[in-house]
Image (cartoon, grey):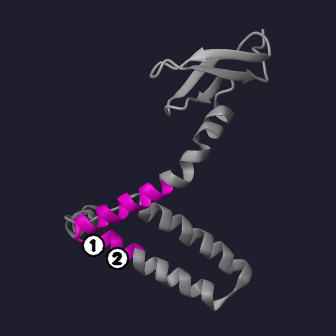
């Protein structure tokens, strides 16, 4: 009996060999495409449909491209832009996730992590890199 699953799997592996594949930029473009599809349901606009088509063509081109050097360079540029947009909010996100510590950014660029104090108020810590003394204002205290 012929196993069609193995045949299609080998054909896919031969077709994808040496191609770019999926990277962070393709994932972002795919999420953008999903948002466009949802917008198209509510707006029913030709412009949104055209943007969907262009996005699908770009995803297909980047996915099947054999020019790895250009695709890697494009992905690095995208990751640098994404990091530049996310990095100012990094400490805010960290504070929301970790409720047992306080975070303070030193003037040398190091982020200092200290445990929650027993009382609210002003606390002092020293930076492990530059040795500068930093003031941390504790607005919440450790729950006992």
In this view, the residue in front, 90 or 72, is 90
Q: Quadrant of residue 126?
A: top right
Element carrying mark 1: loop
Gap between marks 1 and 2, in whole Å?
Answer: 6 Å
Numbered-mark total: 2
Percent across and percent down for residue 118 are 75, 9
Q: Which residue is mark 2?
A: 61
Near mark 1 (Cα within 10 A), the count class, few <14, some 14-19 or many ≥20, is some
Residue 89 is tagged as none
Q: Which residue is mark 1?
A: 65
Q: Does the segment drawn in magenta span residue 73?
A: yes
Please say whether residue 140 is one of the residues in the magenta stretch.
no
As drawn, 120 above or below 69: above
> Quick check: marks 1 and 2 in contact, CB under 8 Å?
yes
Report which quarter residue 50 is drawn in: bottom right
Q: Which image quarter is the N terminus in?
A: bottom left
Range covered by the magenta-colored residues: 59-82
The residue nearer to you, when weighing 28 against 9, is 28
Q: Residue at x 65, y 15 (%)?
A: 124
Q: Which residue: 80% across, 16% down? A: 120
Q: Is residue 121 visible?
A: yes
């Amino acid at each position: 009996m012929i196993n069609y699953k193995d045949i299609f799997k080998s054909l896919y592996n031969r077709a994808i060999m040496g191609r770019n594949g999926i990277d962070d930029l393709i994932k972002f473009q795919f999420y953008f495409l999903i948002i466009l599809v949802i917008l198209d349901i509510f707006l029913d606009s030709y412009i949104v449909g055209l943007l969907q088509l262009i996005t699908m063509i770009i995803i297909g081109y980047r996915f099947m491209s054999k020019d790895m050097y250009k695709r890697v360079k494009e992905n690095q540029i995208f990751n640098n832009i994404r990091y530049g947009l996310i990095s100012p909010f990094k400490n805010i996100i960290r504070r929301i996730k970790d409720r047992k510590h306080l975070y303070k950014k030193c003037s040398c660029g190091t982020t200092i992590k200290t445990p929650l104090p027993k009382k609210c108020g002003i606390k002092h810590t020293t930076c492990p890199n530059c040795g500068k003394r930093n003031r941390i204002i504790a607005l919440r205290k450790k729950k006992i």
